[in-house]
Image (tube, rainbow, N blue to C red):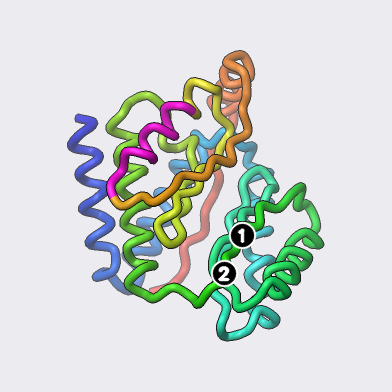
């Protein structure tokens, strides 16, 4: 069953680029609604993380310049910045813009001073992310819903609220995935007792509503 699910995730990654219109939006909305019920972050924090990412992208896009390629991933109000910029000055300026966003608790500035990656590299990064997530499911040692996976130029970043045992399992999976150049861990380690308490809260809260538009 686990191998079948992993294979399905990989197959889905190859089919997504061929789909257009409303179908991807409906699928994404359904998936997000499902994952929100098992995410260890509160619904309020999930919403704040989405807002932070939206604001970061909006604040930076006008000032980063056409030569920059930036991505923002907020998890538990801490923002991972990945991508490529033309200078150290750009890198520092982008960090200042992000840290100034309300609710942001911290920034992991992983920007590289280098030419922007090609579409081929970015497509491969997406495939690596999908492979890591699928292998997390297949491992059965840590819930893939508890691990945020981001890949930039072959480097895999792992975020999440995990116990030490779960973190070690996730790291092992990522490090042994083909095409991964390096693994950077940005986990917030919690105790087993805290993990159990969070699970109780998850089981008692309603699913996060999602709006689906487009078509």
Q: Is residue 162 magenta?
A: no
Residue indicated by mark 1: 81
Q: Residue at x 64, y 50 (%)?
A: 47
Q: Quadrant of residue 162?
A: top right
Residue indicated by mark 2: 70
Q: Secondary structure at mark 1?
A: strand
Q: Nearer the viewer, residue 122 or 49?
A: 122
Say whether disc 1 or disc 2 marks the residue closer to the N-terminus. 2
Q: Residue 97's x, y, as percent?
A: 76, 67
Magenta stretch in the rendered image: 168-178
Horizontal side, residue 212 vs residue 97: left or right: left
Q: Is residue 87 above or below residue 174?
A: below
**Residue reaching furthest to the top:** 193
Question: Distance from label 1 to label 2 (Cα)?
Answer: 7 Å
Quarter in which the C terminus is drawn: bottom left
**Residue reaching furthest to the bottom:** 66
Q: Is residue 23 above or below residue 137?
A: below
Residue 147 seen in the current view: yes
* Callout 1–callout 2 Cβ contact below 8 Å: yes
Residue 208's disc is: none
Horizontal side, residue 87 vs residue 166: left or right: right
Quarter in which the N terminus is drawn: top left
Q: Residue at x 50, y 29 (%)?
A: 167
């Amino acid at each position: 069953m686990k191998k079948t699910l992993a294979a399905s995730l990989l197959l889905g990654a190859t089919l997504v680029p061929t789909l257009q219109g409303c179908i991807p939006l409906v699928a994404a909305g359904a998936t997000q609604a499902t994952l929100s019920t098992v995410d260890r972050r509160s619904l309020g924090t999930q919403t704040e993380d989405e807002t932070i990412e939206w604001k970061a992208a909006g604040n930076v896009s006008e000032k980063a310049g056409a030569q920059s390629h930036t991505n923002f991933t907020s998890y538990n109000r801490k923002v991972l910045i990945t991508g490529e910029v033309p200078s150290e000055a750009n890198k520092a300026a982008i960090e200042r813009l992000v840290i100034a966003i309300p609710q942001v608790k911290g920034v992991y500035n992983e920007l590289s001073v280098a030419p922007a990656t090609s579409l081929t590299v970015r497509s491969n990064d997406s495939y690596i992310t999908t492979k890591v997530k699928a292998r997390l499911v297949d491992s059965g040692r840590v819930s893939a819903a508890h691990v945020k996976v981001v890949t930039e130029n072959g480097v895999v970043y792992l975020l999440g609220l995990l116990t030490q045992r779960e973190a070690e399992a996730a790291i092992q999976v990522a490090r042994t995935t083909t095409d991964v150049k390096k693994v950077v861990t940005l986990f917030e380690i919690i105790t087993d007792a805290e993990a159990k308490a969070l699970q109780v809260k998850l089981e008692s809260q309603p699913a996060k509503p999602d709006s689906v538009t487009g078509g």
